Structures are given as structure tokens and as C-alpha cells.
Image (cartoon, grey):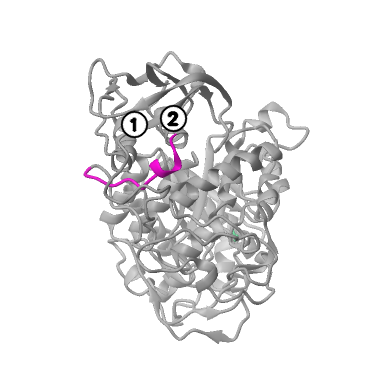
Amino acid sequence: MPRPSRISLRPGGFRLDTATRLRVAPGAERAARLLRGYLTPATGLRLDHADDGTFVLALDPALTGLGEEGYGLTVAAHGVLLRAARPTGLLRGVQTVRQLLPPEALTLPSGPDTAPVGCGTHRPEPAGGTPAGAPPHRVELPGVEITDVPAHPWRGMLLDVARHFQPVTYLHRFVDLLALHKLNVLQLHLTDDQGWRMPVAAYPRLTEVGGRRAESMVGPAGSDRFDGRPHGGSYTRAELAGLVAYAAGRGVTVVPEIGVPGHVRSALAAYPALGNHPERALDVWTRWGVCTNVLGVGDHVLDFFRTVLDETMDLFPSPYVHLGGDEVPTAEWESSPAAIARAAREGLPGPRQLHGWFLGRMADHVLRAGRRPVAWAEDGAALPSECTVMSWRTPEHAWAAARRGHDVVHADHRRVYFDYARGPGPGEPPAQPGHSLDLRTVYGLDLLPPDSAPELAGRVLGAQGQLWTEFVPTPDHIEYLTYPRLCALAERAWNPDHDWPDFRTRMDGHRARLTALGVPHDTLRDRTAPAPRVTGAAPPPPRTLPPAGGSERKETAG
Ligand code: ACM
């Protein structure tokens, strides 16, 4: 999962045992480390290097048809050959090797060359009857011939750590689960009205003040109930650097998102001079919904955010930097003499156009640093032409942007917003009200329009799932909403074939892997067996989470 582009079974299989050695060709060291990080704890096998090792990891730049991420894998009785043109392809192949093993070999990695994984509540008991402390020393890979190349280069997942902060140890696990499904982008939503999680040395109040809110709204946007409990948290630079490295070791790029010029209330609470009413003291927002406070448009605000972006780019080597750009009410600008004057000075028709203008200034800055700016497509209107467009309202916005020459990433809320409930049932845990998305709906994701011209298809980078966390405070809840729907996203972004019965059959097999990793994946209605056992005492989400309420739609509650 996702289905390889070409796979055929072969007779025989390869047995990994204490005699098995890896032959690690130059350039394949990272893949070998990853493979050992997964398999050694699960099997007790060291899988040391030997020049005559029968499990070969090799780079061959002549295999150009495999591209950046493709790989070939041959498993026969006498040996295993994993080949790719580029190191990232080998990392994808390692995940396939993992999936070919019995599910109980799918433990979370640990060991000297991997960072700690899991958040305590997630470390699964060894599955499949393997007693703890006595891993099997023999596992068998089935004979197989695979050639596998992804259809799309951007296969992403957004995690909103602004609405509810998660410790970095959990982010490691989150990344590892993305990598298992060959997703290659983690978009980290680091800033929003309700919290600022990104440390900025030049402006420490962003996290000191902006990283904490007094309480949180209970229920959807518009509710008048609050929980009375402070919520906060922010990352250190070392934690984020560690996450970036951990993800890179798995072929996952962490794309930082610093949202402007809306969704900035936490920054305004820390530095009121950034706002349109510098005299006004604002708190870090405790509500959900669209906040009317947006950034002012003075030079000092542009300079401030250029510095924030510089520090962000310093920490995140990602070629892409996400600038947000969604849900920007223009009322403050329309009643601000300074904003009206700025719009006039810039030759804009009016203050509403300051939205695109502001994004354009930040996009210029990102471009000058040699990176590529990404922004949410709010509607069909033009974004600065240099922006990669992430469309969240309808796929038509993505295709319209592609026709205008933008690279695009699909993030259609009706297909891949995993903050919507997995089903309509009243027993589902809290989720974004308005829709529910079942597995089949996600699988229905289409990245290309039916009449797709080749040049248009080339501008569709891929697709990304979103996990906004207004209603999602814990890792268990994150995983309940993310899985199994992420599997359908991974499938549609990797493999262009559309075959629901085949996907569903493979999904049934894949559930054993998710179970082994302690990932919830069944629906409440068809749960017949106990939820996966987890250590650390946190019961699975369906039993711990109160029922959802409310009816606010995502379109107004992002
Ligand atoms: C969004 O959901 N406002 C991107």
C-alpha cells in the first residue's frame, strides 16, 4: 500500500536469518540504515554489511526511468536486489520490503541511528503472538519482482500543530507512518490565530506570548462554551532540526507553513504593532473560525515577516515554503487610512487587493532565497504567478490555476480533509462539522481533469491530506481521523490506476500492518474486535472521546 506500478510474484522466497548480510553500495548507506532501523528491533537480526552479502542495495544512475523516487526490487531464494537511480528511490523500496514482511516485523524503529519514536501511548505490544523480548530471528520475504514509480511527486499530509500542539516525539511517529505509505511531504502548520509554535530568535515573544492561549472553545465556531484550560507549546530549533533530519532519513520533506496575512492573531497578541490597530491589545485567539484580525501593511510588518521567513528557511531546507494566504477578511484594511493609502501608493484598485499584494511581497522574498512559495487557493482568483497553488475549496480552482501556469497541489476539502468525520454516525469522535468523508470518497480523488492536456497534467504536482486540529487534541485522535483514509490518498497519489475493489482487498490486508503499529483503522460501526492494545494506558479514541456536536461548515471554520 500503495500498489506498486508493476508487481509479479515469483516462486520461492528469501529467508532473512542470522547469516544474512547486506551488500551496501556507495550511496545506499541511508537506505541500509533505515532498513536496519526497522528490521533489527523487530527480528533481532543485525544485517551487517558484507561485500558478498546476498541482500543488495545498489544505486544505478543509468536507471533514469525510475526518476527520483522509483525503485526496482527483486526477491528470489538466493538473494534480494533493491535498485534505484537515486537514494530516495531506495528509501521507497525499503518501505516495500517492510510491507512484504509479516506484519509483526513492522515495529517502530528505535536504536542509535534513529530518533525516539512514539509518544508513550503509542508503542504497540508486539503483535502476532511474538513474545516481548524474544523477536523472531527468521523472517521470509516472498519471491517478487517489482518496478515501482510514483505518478506524482507531491504526496503530502498537513498536520496542524497550531490549534493543538503535539510534542516532537509524536511528530516523529507521524512522519514514520507517512513514510510507510510512501508519502513524501509533511506540511507543518506552525502558526495560526490560536498558537505560534515556530521559534524565532529575533522575536521571542512569538512563542513566549503567541504560543499559549488561555482556553479553547468547546464545540464548533460560534459556540459560547470554553474549556477554561490553558493550552500551549512551541518547538525548539533543535527539535525542529531533529525532525527535519529524521524525516529526511525517510525521504520525507518537512514543508513549513507560516501563514500570512490572515490567521495571525497569535502574532498580533505578541507584537500588536504588526496589526492595523497597534494600540489594541489582543489575546491569542481562544475561538475557532475565521478571525477578522489581519496584518497591517506597513514596511515594518513586511520586514518582520521577512525575518521570520529567513529563520524558517534557515531551519527547514525544504525547496518549498508555504505562506498560507487563506481566509483573509479585508474589513480592517477597508477601514484603515494607512491601508487605503498603501493600496493607492501601490497602484492597487483598492485595499482588498492588499491580500494578493502582501502575499506577492513574501513570495518575492522566498524566491530571492532560492525557494518556491506555496499558497492556498482561496478562490479562482489569481495568486502571484510565482506561487505554487494548493487548492482546498474545489478541484476546479486547481485546474484553473494550472491553466494560468501555476504548479498545483490538490487539497480538496471534500476529498482529503481528514478533520471531517470518517462517517456520519453519532458515535464518531469530535470532528470538523459539515461533511463526513469515508474511505471510498477519499479514494475518489481525481488529480487530473478528464480532458487533461499534457502540459496541464505536468503542472499537477500531486495531492495532500489535511488534519486541522481544532477538535483534535491528542495523537490517538489524530490517528483515528488520519487512518485509514491516508491509505486511500497515498494510493491515488502514487498509482494512477483506479480500481476500488482491488484497493479494498489490499486495504483489508494492510489493516494487519496498521494493527501491528497500533494505528486505529476500523470504523466504530464495524468494530468487532477490541481496539489495538497500546501500552502507556491511553485507551483508544472511541472510548475516550466525547461525541461530536454542532453543524458549522468547514468553508467558514477553517
Ligand atoms: C483552509 O482550510 N482554510 C486552507
Give the structural element (helix, strand or loop) at label 1: helix
- Residue type at tag 2: Gly
287 to 127, vertically: above or below: below
x, y percent for residue 381: 69, 51
In magenta segment, residue 455? no
User: Rounded to the nearest whole Å, what is the CA distance between mark 2 and mark 1?
Assistant: 9 Å
Circle 2 Cα neighbour tier, 10 Å, few/some/many (<14 / 14–19 / ≥20) = many
Report the disc number at residue 93: 2
Which residue shows up at 43% across the image and 13% down it?
A: 62
Residue 182: x %, y % from top left: 49, 38
Q: Residue 365, percent across and down?
A: 43, 48
**Which residue extends farthest right?**
451
Magenta span includes 111 = yes
- Is the residue at mark 2 in contact range of ligand 1, meaning its CB lies under 8 Å from it? no
523 over 513 or under it: above or below: below
Q: Which residues, given as a range, are shown in magenta?
A: 101-112
The secondary element bearing badge 2 is classed as helix
